[in-house]
Amino acid sequence: MLEMKGIDKRFGAVVALNKASLTVKEGEVMALAGSNGSGKSTMVKVLAGLVAPNAGEILIDGEKKIIHSGTDSTREGIATAFQDLSLIPTMSVKDNILLGCEIVTKSGMVDEKESRRLVQELLDRFHIDCDPDDYVQTLMPSTQSMLEVAKAVFRKPKILLLDEVTASLHYDEIATLFDIMRELKNEGVSMVYVTHRMNEIFEICDSITIMRSSETVTSGPVSDFTLDDIIFYMTGARPKHSEAKTAAAEDQDDREVVVEVKNISVYPKVKDISMKAYKGEIVGIGGLEGQGQPEVIRSILGAVRPQSGSICYMGKDVRFKDPAAGVKAGIGFISGDRSKEAVFDIRTITENIFAGNSAKESLFAYLSAKKVRKFSEDAVKKYNIKIGKLKDPASSLSGGNQQKLVVARWIAMNPNLLLLDDPTKGVDIHSRQEIHDILRECAANGMTVIIAASDTDELLNISDRVYVFYEGKVAAELSGEFKTSEHLVSAMMGVKEKVQEAE
């Protein structure tokens, strides 16, 4: 059994944890839930030995333990799989998995044959399709995330910490992970599972601990909670249930086509994709990872050059030379990969919000400080972004507020077409709902939205129609009574059913 009691952690004047606590029984999966900035990631880091608490105690099987380093954590039988991967990109899969626990012969030499056998056995167990000698940096993000978990499991821990590990995984990979988690439960492994996907909590977890504002507010068996209960304890307010009502209910024949993609191909993933989006409509793109979703979105923006096919935007055939040209034409883009494609960490909140607007200006255009500040203040207020000061760096914000900052950046510009690539990855349910409400309002006001998402429930909830990609082609177009989880998953897996076939 694992217990954390009265854990305090402060970073200067910032209170990260305030007398927080949790308990995990042997062979139990405990969900650790909370909005971004609630303190749950800090709790995981305390157990992983990355953060030393200012006060409190940690007990394992009733004995008080001191964990002030990763070595301390490992010695106590704790292994962690992080959302921000601990893998070394320039090393091979085999070397990453074995790092720190190499297999050696009696003479003290590395046993290459046995090492390769064990690593391949692990890859097979996780259904990871790669070679042990492949470099990590050459693998898809979802494969890297699975390797992160496999690396932790390889250490045969008594306590396994899983921090947002499904954020980059797709349907089939999550199913594999959950099967392995059930096997580990039967072996007596205790697990702390951090996720923002509420359906996963009800599917795989036995108990739940909910945090808010650096404190533990409640805990108990998952069966004692409803989804509304969890949201209430996370936010302090009961959720308001809104329906996705947009202009999609109108007859499509009478509506303006804002963008139409015709038979485009982008080597090697996109082979022949055709789709269209009407004014005031939210169009979803679904499919397993690697089926061409990011490439299609970026080809519309001008970040990727298709080898064939055409794109018609606002009634004209276009092929933007770069994203800046797409932005000037009235297209916005929001990525779920905040660190690489969305947020400028060391720049101020003001600079981050105004970045999109400045891209529309000419190179030597004069920007008054008053105009920039007013634009940023209005965006922060309208989209309820929790900040300290506008001059603070964007890195000072929680993940959910960073993503709302990016949403504010583009929507404040009022684009004709907004493209989103997995925009709520790693975002808490409250912030996700706020982003969804913003997108619905924008669509109701005439903006066209195209959103790709790895979360099937999110895709069905937010979209009017869904195009499902499979092996670089549109496998199905789902709307109305056909827009169901069963049809979506079947099309994602390449199963032919009596669903709306793509034209």
Image (cartoon, rainbow, N blue to C red):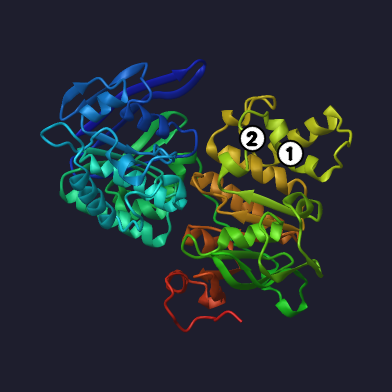
Q: Residue at x 41, y 61 (%)?
A: 171
Q: Residue at x 72, y 32 (%)?
A: 351
User: Where's residue 389, x and y in %?
Assistant: 67, 25
Where on the picture, by quarter, is residue 268? bottom right
In the displayed structure, does residue 156 sit left or right of residue 290? left
User: Where's residue 83, x and y in %?
Assistant: 42, 41
Disc 1 packing (10 Å; few <14; some 14–19; many ≥20): some
Question: Helix, strand or loop at disc 2?
Answer: loop
Q: Is residue 278 above or below residue 235?
A: below
Q: Residue at x 63, y 65 (%)?
A: 283
Q: Residue at x 24, y 48 (%)?
A: 116
Res 344 label: 2
Q: Which part of the image, by quadrant, shows the C terminus? A: bottom right
Res 447 label: none
Disc 2 packing (10 Å; few <14; some 14–19; many ≥20): some
Q: Which part of the image, by quadrant, shows the N terminus? A: top left
The CA distance from mark 2 to mark 1 is: 9 Å
- The amino acid type of the residue labelled 1 equals Ala
User: Where's residue 59, x and y in %?
Assistant: 21, 26
Viewer-side residue, 7 vs 216: 7
Where on the picture, by quarter, is residue 191? top left
In the displayed structure, does residue 105 sit left or right of residue 282? left
Residue 192 in view of the camera: no
In the displayed structure, does residue 139 sit left or right of residue 296? left
Viewer-side residue, 398 vs 271: 271
Where on the picture, by quarter, is residue 259? bottom right
- The amino acid type of the residue labelled 2 equals Phe
Residue position for label 1: 355
Q: What is the residue that sits farthest to the bottom in this orientation?
A: 498
User: Where's residue 66, x and y in %?
Assistant: 25, 19
